[in-house]
């Protein structure tokens, strides 16, 4: 069960999307109702899911990597389009590898997160950036803006 501190971390996390053949995007949570320009050619919705650290328990890197491979295999088996995504705490720097799944219905995104031991998933559309509990007990609706993804050299 996610704690209030977990929810604060979910609300403030940024998510980097690695789009094939295009510049990466960083989604930054913003004030509810405030949104940036939706990226050209990107269909909505976009769901962000990870399989890392289920139940907020920090696992070893190799265990998280194995969990991530199971998630991506499931997406491939289902024929879903996804891009690599990394959620990160912009202050502490903690990061978790995940996926941005294109066109997945909310119920399916929540169920995917639940099956992979997650407390919540992100749902992104032109009007909002939402954090939705996988047990449906909570929803945080925020705004969003885009920022460049910092490069390692600067």
Image (cartoon, grey):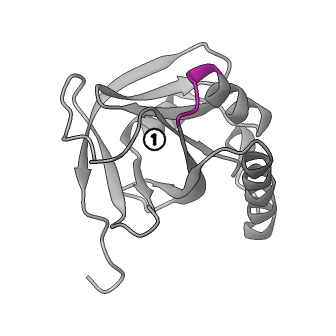
Residue interval drawn in magenta: 103-107
* Rendered residue at 74%/65% (across/down): 65
Q: Is residue 40 left or right of residue 76?
A: left
- Figure quadrant of residue 63: bottom right
**Does the magenta portion include 114?**
no
Task: Tell me which residue sits at (79%, 33%) in the image.
Answer: 115
Residue 70, image x, y percentages: 81, 54
> For residue 136, what is the image quadrant?
top right
Could you tell me how many numbered marks the image carries?
Answer: 1
Q: Quadrant of the N terminus?
A: top right
* Frontmost residue, 41 versus 122: 41
Q: Position of residue 127 (x, y in %)?
A: 29, 25
Q: Which residue lies at the image location 70% right of the left edge and 54% below the top edge?
A: 58
Residue 36 coordinates in the image, percent (x, y): 19, 40
Q: Among all residues in the image, which is located at the extreme top?
A: 137
Q: Dividing the image into 4 quarters, which one contains the C terminus? A: bottom left
How far across and how far down the image is residue 106, in percent?
57, 23
Q: Which residue is mark 1?
A: 9
Along the viewing direction, whichever of 150 and 11 lies nearer the viewer: 150
Query: Callout 1: few (<14), some (14-19), or many (20+) C-alpha neighbours within 10 Å?
Result: some
């Amino acid at each position: 069960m996610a704690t209030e501190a977990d929810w604060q971390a979910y609300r403030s996390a940024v998510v980097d999307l690695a789009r094939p053949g295009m510049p990466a995007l960083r989604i930054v949570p913003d004030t509810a109702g405030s949104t940036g320009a939706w990226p050209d050619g990107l269909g909505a919705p976009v769901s962000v899911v990870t399989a890392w650290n289920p139940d907020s328990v920090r696992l070893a890197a190799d265990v998280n990597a194995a969990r991530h491979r199971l998630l991506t295999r499931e997406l491939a088996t289902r024929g879903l389009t996804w891009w690599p995504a990394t959620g990160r705490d912009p202050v502490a720097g903690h990061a978790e590898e995940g996926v941005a799944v294109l066109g997945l219905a909310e119920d399916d995104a929540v169920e995917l997160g639940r099956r992979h031991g997650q407390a919540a998933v992100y749902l992104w559309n032109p009007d909002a950036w939402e954090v939705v509990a996988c047990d449906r007990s909570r929803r945080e609706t925020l705004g969003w803006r885009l920022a460049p993804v910092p490069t390692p050299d600067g």
